[in-house]
Amino acid sequence: MNESSTVATRLKRLIDEARSQKEVARLAHVSDGTLINWGRGLGLRESKMRDVARRLGVSVEWFRDGLGDEEAEIASFRTRLAEGVGGPRGALQRAREAAGLTLGALSKRTGYPVWILSQLESGGIRASEKLIDTLCRALPDLNKEELIIGSDHPFIIDVTGVHGTHGASVKLALPTGVKGRYVPLLSSAEAGICDAGHSDGGYEYSGIFALNVDDRSAFAIKVSGNSMEPNLRDGDMVICSPAQEVNNGDAAVVRTHSDNVHIKYWQRRGERVLLESANPAYPPIEVPYEEIAGAWPIVQTITAGKVRRQ
């Protein structure tokens, strides 16, 4: 039996389990016609199998090659079936359908091409905050916070508990009164003069464990470089709280309108800002205050798996 027919056989098993071809198509984020073609062994490219398997809640090894415990895979599919289309992309699809809009109609309403909206719903691309704002204005049932802080990826936590999927439940035993959660890990930033991009996009899935951080817009960034040594080292993680104001002397992640990103000590002097390093080998950077696009104080540092409050 060739690869296509074996995939088609397993797809039929999932359709039989769901008792609905339409429901499987919805979970896979494809049309009924596309699913019918896949069932005939047509059109499902190797490059798409991993994403399709993830959406259906099964492993790509089983879906593509029939490897592993089939009953365990079916049980996982049943769980996915019970959950329905979850996460931000599911929320987007449900809000669009509740408004009675096709992707084409939503495209006309928002000004974004159909292929971008389709890719969002299928999980192919991330959304910028500007696009999320536009979608929320167009779809009254859509919640901006759900889109920005949610995750469509399986909840996975590493053995240290420091790295996990954004949105996963914390498995660590914490002292009474102490709360922990996973905040999204954004782009790496050099602790020096850099052109690192800081992403405001939604649908982030990598998370870093944070203690007692109530700011729902908090995020983590990985340090790259040595300009903040010995206080911050290459590979450390810093957690920032956009809800808090940055004060003189604070260690902060600072982005300029030219999209340069720095991890520095913040010093505002009138209409100028001085960004200072801990490492004396790096001279201060002085920029006009109007050039600052954002400055977010660092509230926690994670060094070698240990969380340290600022």
Image (tube, rainbow, N blue to C red):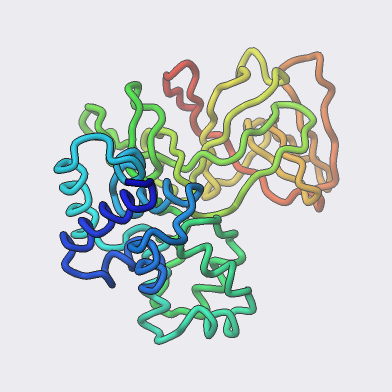
Residue at coordinates 64% horizontally, 12% vertically from top-left? 230
Task: Say above or below: 284 vs 40.
Answer: above
Task: State which quadrant residue 209 falls in.
Answer: top left
Q: Image check: 41 left or right of 103?
A: left
Task: State which quadrant residue 186 falls in.
Answer: top right
Residue at coordinates 40% horizontally, 51% vertically from top-left? 151
x then y, percent, for residue 157: 33, 32
Residue at the farthest front position: 1
Q: Image check: 77 left or right of 166?
A: left
Residue at coordinates 50% horizontally, 18% vertically from top-left? 303
Residue at coordinates 36% horizontally, 66% vertically from top-left? 35
Task: Say above or below: 173 vs 123.
Answer: above
- Comparing 103 with 190, the one in front is 103
x then y, percent, for residue 239: 51, 35
Task: Say above or below: 245 vs 230.
Answer: below
x then y, percent, for residue 113: 63, 74
x then y, percent, for residue 205: 45, 44
Q: How many marks?
A: 0
Task: Say above or below: 223 vs 148.
Answer: above
